[in-house]
Each structure stands twice: as structure tokens, then as C-alpha cells.
Amino acid sequence: MNLKALGIKFIATTIIIFSIFGIFYDVSFFNLFLVSILTTAISYVIGDLFILGRFGNVVASISDFFLAFITVATLGYFFIETTMPIIVASLFSAFFMSLVEPFLHAYMQEQDVSSGHKEYRTPPIGDLQFEISEETEAQSINRKNDPKRDNTK
């Protein structure tokens, strides 16, 4: 796990959550901070470590939008007490978070953070090579000295 990438994601998420929910809703600092921490953790584990490593930047960025929307909306209903609908603010938050994600994904792929292992890439047909060779002198000498073969002939 790269703490720098997680820190960047946390700062961006916190700024977005505090900006949107702090301006339009009367929410306590603690509740906004808690929503930011949980959204960052869930989005990092599912979107950045799991989806990014397997499907790439485009799919991870799109899925991060939906993941951020669902997470912020759900956590908003639990931690933000208001009479105004949270769905619109959650959509705006998810939108702004998804604008940051491609840059974070590019950084993570550059640092090779998104997967603990190199992903296997099947080479395209044009990248395949083959080699044809004849026996070398070393191979014929090894055959002559092989005790399993009858060398007396």
C-alpha cells in the first residue's frame, strides 16, 4: 500500500466532501471527517487496488464515480442529519471525485501501486516470435557420450 497515493486521495476526498456538504448542509466537522475517511478507505480498496489493477484506468475511473456516489449517499444518510435530500450533493461529490481519479490512477500505475504483482498481459499476435535452428555441435557430442546409447557401432 502506498501511503502517498492514499494521502492524496484522502486530501482530495476531504476537500470535496467538506466543500459540498459543509457549504450546503449544516454538518459537524466530525461527521464530515468520518464520511471522508470511510469514503477514501472504501474507494481506495475497491476502486484503486482491486479494479484498477485488473481492468485499467478507464474502467476504474467510471466505477469510482458509482462507488463514490453510493458510498457518500449511504454514509450521508447515516451521519448527516438534514431535511434536504443528500442524493444531489452525493452526485456532485462523486462527479468531482471522479475528475480527480484519472490523475491518481496514472500516478498509481506509474508507481505500480494498484497491484501487488505485475498483471499478466497476453502479447498480441504480432509480438510473437519463433526460432528455428539445427543441431549444434555440442548436442551431437552429448549424444555420442550418452551411456544409454550404444556407441560401439
Image (cartoon, helix red, strand yellow):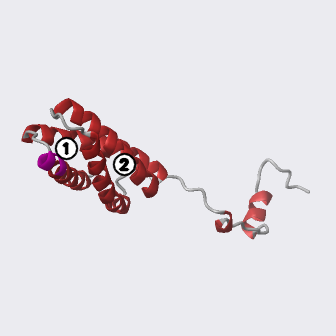
Q: Is residue 45 visible?
A: no
Amino acid type, residue under disc 1 in the picture: Ser
Q: Is residue 37 above or below residue 62?
A: above
* Quadrant location of the C terminus in the rendered image: bottom right
Helix, strand or loop status at disc 2: helix
Name the residue carrying label 2: 64
Name the residue carrying label 1: 36
* Cα gap from disc 2 to disc 1, whole angstroms: 15 Å
Nearer-N-terminus badge (2/1): 1
Residue at 35% across / 58% down in the picture?
A: 105
Residue 123 position within the rendered picture, expressed as x and y whole percent measured from the top left: 61, 61
Residue at 15% across / 32% down in the picture?
A: 81
Residue at 33% across / 60% down in the picture?
A: 111
Q: Magenta stretch: give its range.
A: 20-24
Q: Main secondary structure of the magenta part?
A: helix
Residue at 67% across / 65% down in the picture?
A: 128
Q: Is residue 146 left or right of residue 60?
A: right
Residue 70 position within the rendered picture, expressed as x and y whole percent measured from the top left: 33, 39
> Which label belongs to residue 48?
none
**Of residues 143 and 53, which is closer to you in this image?**
53
Q: Is residue 138 visible?
A: yes
Q: Is residue 105 above or below residue 44?
A: below
For this orientation, the residue located farthest to the front is: 83
Helix, strand or loop status at disc 1: helix
For this orientation, the residue located farthest to the left is: 29
Q: Is residue 143 above or below residue 76?
A: below
**Of residues 25 and 11, which is closer to you in this image?**
25
